Image (cartoon, coloured by chain):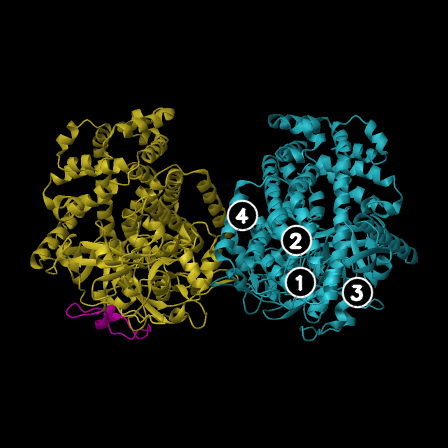
Chain colours: A cyan, B yellow
Amino acid sequence: MLSAAGVATAAACVNQRLRRETTMRLMVILLVGGILAVLTQSVAADDGMFPMSELSRLNLRERGLDLTAEELFNPSGVSLVDGICRVNGCTGSFVSANGLIITNHHCAFGAIQKASTRERDLLQEGFRAASRAEEIPAPDYQVRITEDYQDVSEQVLSVIAAEMSFLERTRAVDRRCRELEQEAEKQHPGLRAEVSEMFPGRTYVLFLYTYLKDVRLVFAPPVSVGNFGGEIDNWEWPRHTGDFSFMRAYTAPDGSSATYAEENIPYRPRRHLQVAAEGVDEGDAVFLLGYPGRTSRHRTAEFVRYERDIRLPLTVELYSWQISEMERAAAEDREVAIRVASRMRSLANVEKRSRGQVLGLTRAGIVEQRSAREAELQKYIDADASRRQKYGTVLSEINGVYAEMTAAGPWEIHFQQLRQACQAMSYGFYVVDAAAERAKADLEREESYQDRNFEQTSGRMLLSIRDWNRRLDITLLSGILERLGQFPESRKIPALQRLTENASLIGQHAESLLTATSLGDAEFVRACLEKSSEELAALDDPLLHLLIELYPQYVQMRDQQKAQDGQLDRLYGSLLEVKEQFLAEAFVPDANATLRLTTGRVRGYSPADAVIRTPISTLRGVIEKTTGAAPFNTPDAVLKAWQADDSGQFRHPRLGQVPVAILYDTDTTGGNSGSPVLNRRGELVGVNFDRCFEATINDFAWNTDYSRSIGVDIRYVLWITSRVYGAGYLLQEMGVDSAE
Amino acid sequence: MLSAAGVATAAACVNQRLRRETTMRLMVILLVGGILAVLTQSVAADDGMFPMSELSRLNLRERGLDLTAEELFNPSGVSLVDGICRVNGCTGSFVSANGLIITNHHCAFGAIQKASTRERDLLQEGFRAASRAEEIPAPDYQVRITEDYQDVSEQVLSVIAAEMSFLERTRAVDRRCRELEQEAEKQHPGLRAEVSEMFPGRTYVLFLYTYLKDVRLVFAPPVSVGNFGGEIDNWEWPRHTGDFSFMRAYTAPDGSSATYAEENIPYRPRRHLQVAAEGVDEGDAVFLLGYPGRTSRHRTAEFVRYERDIRLPLTVELYSWQISEMERAAAEDREVAIRVASRMRSLANVEKRSRGQVLGLTRAGIVEQRSAREAELQKYIDADASRRQKYGTVLSEINGVYAEMTAAGPWEIHFQQLRQACQAMSYGFYVVDAAAERAKADLEREESYQDRNFEQTSGRMLLSIRDWNRRLDITLLSGILERLGQFPESRKIPALQRLTENASLIGQHAESLLTATSLGDAEFVRACLEKSSEELAALDDPLLHLLIELYPQYVQMRDQQKAQDGQLDRLYGSLLEVKEQFLAEAFVPDANATLRLTTGRVRGYSPADAVIRTPISTLRGVIEKTTGAAPFNTPDAVLKAWQADDSGQFRHPRLGQVPVAILYDTDTTGGNSGSPVLNRRGELVGVNFDRCFEATINDFAWNTDYSRSIGVDIRYVLWITSRVYGAGYLLQEMGVDSAE
C-alpha cells in the first residue's frame, strides 16, 4: 500500500460497471438485510494505534513484549523509537550506526524511478552501491525523526471564541498552531515543530522533529522482486514480494541537517535497530512502530455512508480511467512507462484499496453497525435533560454536514480532479495559488506556502515536472472536461463553458490549451513562482489564464471545506465528550501520521468459508507464481540461487524454505509502509508493507477476524541482499553474521 | 464437470492470448527447467479406479471400509452395486424401492431445460412434482444398470491376423465385439451387451446391462442453487453448489423396460442405497461407485505433449470463441438463452477443464516425468537382447503415431469442428453418414447406425433440433470457415474453396447456405433419415449438397484414425506387457465408462503456498458469496430459511452450519458426475459432481497432494429438499426421519 498523497479526490460520471455493482449491492442489502451484520464481529477491543503518550497505560507484557514503556520511548534518554524515522510518507528504520535505513521498495520507488533512464533502468535491473560514493542522491526525499512532544490542546483551543463563524474558527486554530510551531522552533534551533490534531476539536500535540535532507539510495532489488506480483497481488495475501530497499541519511560534516553535498557524512542515529536474522514463527508476538496516516474510526455512520456511496466509488471510476490511459501511453514507449510508473502505481494502489473498502464496508455492514450504536448513544443523550440540552442535536448536526457533502460531493470531486488528473493544470494551480497566498503574512498562508515549507513543496513540484507528458495530459484533460460537461446546468462552471459546450470539440480545446501552454516547462514554472498575481495575469499563456479565471471558485470551495471542518471539529469535540461518558472509557485517537505503537501476533486468517491462509509465505510460492511475464517474472539470479538451494541460515526450520513474507494481526494503515516489524525483544524481523484485501477497511474499522498486515520477512531481505545480489557487506554493516 | 460428449474436437487458429501463454510457458520451462519436477510429487501409489474384477485384490478394511468385496459387488446375489445406475453420461443412485434416483442437477440439466419454456422456466424456478402424476418425462434420458460381466479378451483377440493392416485390425476387433454382443443378447433377452476395451489391445470385458427408457424428472432446485457459482466456481473449491436433482425410472406394468407410457410403473431396483442423514466429517473414509469416462494414465509422454500443445489449447480457443458467440445471442433473447444453455455450459465446462489441464500438465511437468520413466523403460528393454528384439521399437513406433497426429492435428480438429460448431451441418452429416452406413450389413456399420442403437441416437439428434438457432449457426459457420480459410494451400479443402477464397464474402456464403437449408427442420431431417444416399443427392438443399461433397474426406479421416487406433492398440498391448515385467506389478486399467470403485477420505489440500482449503463448505459461504446477481443469486427461499435458522438435524455439529459440499481425495473423472459418495458402511453421504481446478489433470495423472473431488453434502440435499422447498415427502420415501 502506497501512502496516498492526500485524500483521493477523484471525479467522473459513475460508469456502467459501477452502477451495476451498486445495484447488486443494494439488492444484497435488501435481500439479505440484517443477516450480514450477524456475520461480522463488531470492532474488537484489541485494535489500537497507540500514541507515545498512551504507552504507560498499556500492559506490554500481556501483549507479549519483553520491553518496558521507557525502553520503547524515552524523550529524555535513548530508546527504541530513536531507531525509527519517517521517510517521506512512509516509515523507516535505522539499521546501522552509519545512518543505513531499511524501508519498502515502494517507498524508495520514486528515488529509483528518478535515477532511472532508458539506458540504465534501475527499476528493472535493481541497484547496488558497491561503495558510499556510488550511492545515488534522492533529492525529493526527507527523513524525519521524532525528538519530543507536548500536549498543547489548551493553548490551541484558547483562541476559539463563541461568536466565530466556522471558517473563522478553523483559521484561528490553524494560525494558533503555526504560532506555537514558530515559538517552539525558536526554542529548539535545528528542529522542526508540527502541531497535530489528535482528537478533532479536542486535543492537539506539538511534536519536535529532526529533518534530514540528504538521503541516498543504497540498495534496491529489481522491481520483479520488490514489486513481485504487482497490482494483481497488491492488497492480497499470500504475498511473495520482496518489498524492501536500503537508503542512507547524511548530514553536514558538523552533524547538522543539510541538503546533498559531497562532503556530507552519514547520519549517526542515537540508536539503531538490531536485526534478528532468525525471524519469527506463527503465533509469535510482534509489534510495529510507525507513522500511520489517517483512519476514520471515530466518524459517524453518515460519514462512512458518504465514503461508501460517493467518494470511494467515484475514486474507483476516475482512477481506473486514468490508469487505463496511462497504461496505453506506457505501452507505446518505455520512456513514458518509466515516467508514469510511480504515479500509475499510486493511483492503482488507491483504486484497489477503494474497491476493497466499498466491498468491505458493505459486507461488514459498517454503516448499519455504527447507526445502531449511534441510536444507542442518542437514547442515552435523550434520557437526561441536561445531556439532551448540551448534546441533543450533535449527531443530527454532524449528519447535516455530511448531507451537504453528499449533495455537493460528485461535482466537487470532479472539479478537484480537473487540476489533479491534468498535471499541467496542477502546476499552474500551484503557481496561481502561491502568488495569492505568498502575498499574505506568513502565518495567514496555506501551509504549503509558508516560508518554512515553500522551498520543499515547490522543489518537489518542480522535480515532478520532469515526468510530464503532453500527450497523456491532453487525454486526461479531455476526459475530465467531458465528465464536467455532463453535470446539470446548475453545476456549470462559467470559465469552462466555452470548452465543454460542444462535446465533440473538447478534445481540440484540450489539445490547443496544452500545446500552447508552457506550464509543462520547469524553467517557466520556476520563473512564475517569482511573480505576483498581476504579473502572472500579464503572461501570455492560455492555460494559466484559465486557471486564474477558475481560481476564485477553487478558493471558495476550499473555504467552504474549512468551514465544514470547523463545524465538524466543534461537533466531534462534543460527540467524543458524551461518548466517553456513555462508554465510560478512553479512546485511542484516529491515526494522524504521528508516531504510533501497535502490537499483535503472527497469525493466519480465514478470508472465506473453507479457506485458511497461513501466515508465512515461502520462496516456493515465488517459484509457483513465476510465469516469466511481469509482474511474475522472477529474475534469473533468484531462480539460480533457489536451484542452488543456497538458503543456509535463512531457511525456516519447519517450512524448509526461505520465508518471503509474514502476516500478523497488528493494527496498521497507510503510512505504516516501511514500519519495522519487531519481535518481543524489539529486534527487527520484518518490514511492513501492505494489508490483506479484507483489511482495506482498517481505515474505518478494525476486526480481529480479518484485519491482517503484511511484512517482508527479514530472512528474505537478508537472503536477497547477500546470497542473490552479493551485497553481503550490508549484512556486515547491520551486524548480521552471514557466514555459511 | 459435465461429461463431455466425446473427445473435444475443437478447431481454430491459435489466437494471440494463447500464443502469449505458450510463450510464457516456454520461458518458464527454459528458466525454471528441472525445478518444477522437484515441486511435484509423482503419481502416488494410492490412485485407482478399480473395475469390479479387481475388488478381490483390494484390502477394503485398510481403506477404511466396513464392507466385503461381495457386499459391494455380487453378480449372483444382491449387493451395493445394484443401487447404482448410469444416467446418460452420468452416474446415479437408487434411493428408494420405487426407482427414485438421485443424480446431479447438471446431469438432469437437459431434462429440466427441455421441459422449460419462456412461461414456465424450470431452470430459474426449480421443479417439484407434488405427486407421481406431475413428474415430467425426460424422453432423451436412459438409465443403465450393470447386471454382469465376463472377460472376452481371448475371443476378441483371436480374430486378429498378422497380415492385417491397422485399419483392418480395428475393423475386425470392432466387428468381433459386435458379434459377441449379439450372441450375449440372444442368451439374455431384455438385457443389452456391451464389450469394453479395458487395456488397449489386451483385455476386453463384456458387460450385461439393463436399460430403462422411461425416466422422469421429480425434483430440481432452481439453477441458482443447483448451479450456484456457475462457470466462475466450476472446477473450483470451496464450492457452494447444490448440484443435485431427483429423477425416477419407470418400467412397463410387467416390469420390463419400456418407453414412456401413462400406465408404466416405478422401477423396483433389487437394492437401493440407505441415506445417512448425519453425513461425514473431515478425515472420514468415503468411497465412490460410478462410471468414470476416460483417463490417459497409460499413454506415453508424446501423447500428453500432443494434448498439452495441440489439442487442449485449440479446444480452449475454439470453445471460448463459440461460448462468447452464444453469450451474445443469449443476451439478446431469454428464449435463445434457454435453448443454448445446456450446450454453452457443456462447452464452458470443457473449456475451463482444458485450461486447467494445460496449466496443470505444464506445472506438474507430466511430459517430462513420463519421458524420464520411458527412458528408464527403454534402458530396461535394451539391456536384454530378446527383449530388445521383441519390444525395442515399441516406444518409438508409438511416438511415430503421435508425431503424425501432431502434424495433422490442427487441421483435423478444425475440419471436425466444421460440423460440430455448426449444428445444421451436424444434423446434415448425421443424415449423410446414416444413409451410407445403413446401406451396409448391420455389423459392418459405425456403432451409432447399428440397428440396436439407431433409434436412440437418431431420436436424440432429432430432439436437439428443437434448440436450433439459425442466426447463431450462421455466426458459427462463418467463424469456422474463416479459420479453415487460413490454412496453407496444402490443407485446402476443394469442396470449401469457393466459400473461403474471398474472406470478406464468407459471412454471405454462410448466411445463404443456412437460409436456404431445411436441415434445421426436424421433420425434414426425419424424412431424410429414410432416404438412401442417391435420394439425398437428388434433394434440393445446398447445405446437404455441400456435406455430400465433403463426406468422402470425413470418411477418409475416420478411417485414418481407425488405422492409428489399430496401430496404437497393438503397440500399447506390447508396451503394457513389457512394462508389467519391468515394474513387476499389475495396473489398474484406464477409465472407460465401466463401473469402478474408488476410495479415499474427506480431506482438504493446499493449492498454493500459504493457502489451505478445508474440506467442508457451509451455508455461511453461500451467504458470503451471494451478490444478488447470477450466478450468485441465492433464491429468497434459501435466504429466508437461513435467516430462520431452520437447520435442525442437518447442521454440522462442529461448524454450526448446514454443510453444503465436501471434498475428498478419491480418484474420479468425468462420468463420475452423480456418483454416490458413501460412508464406510456404504450409506449415502453425498453426490459427487466436480473436481478442484488442480485435479483437472486427473485425466492424465493422479496426485495425492491436489487430486480432490467435490460432492454436494447429503445434509444440504435434505435441507434444501425438505426445509426450503417443502418436498419432505421425498425424505419419507428415502426413509429419512425429517421431524424437527
Given residues B495 and A295, the one toward you in this image is: A295
Residue B714 coordinates in the image, percent (x, y): 34, 65
Residue A274 coordinates in the image, percent (x, y): 73, 66
* Callouts 1 and 3 on one subunit: yes
Q: Would you say A257 lies left or right of B379 here?
A: right
Observer-side mark, 2 or 1, equals: 1
Q: Which residue is mark 3?
A: A271
Q: Earlier in the sequence, mark 3 or mark 4?
A: 4
Rendered view: B478 above or below B446: above
Q: Amino acid at mark 4?
A: Thr
Given residues A277 and B543, the one toward you in this image is: B543
Observer-side mark, 3 or 2, equals: 2
User: Which chain's residue wears label 4?
Assistant: A
Q: Which residues are magenta?
A: B55-79
Q: Earlier in the sequence, mark 4 or mark 2?
A: 4
* CB contact under 8 Å: marks 2 and 1: no
Q: Which residue is mark 4?
A: A22
Q: Earlier in the sequence, mark 2 or mark 1?
A: 2
Residue A378: mark: 1
Q: Which residue is mark 2?
A: A303
Q: Would you say B189 lies left or right of B409 here?
A: left
Query: Which secondary structure, mark 4?
Result: helix
Q: Is residue A695 visible to us here?
A: no
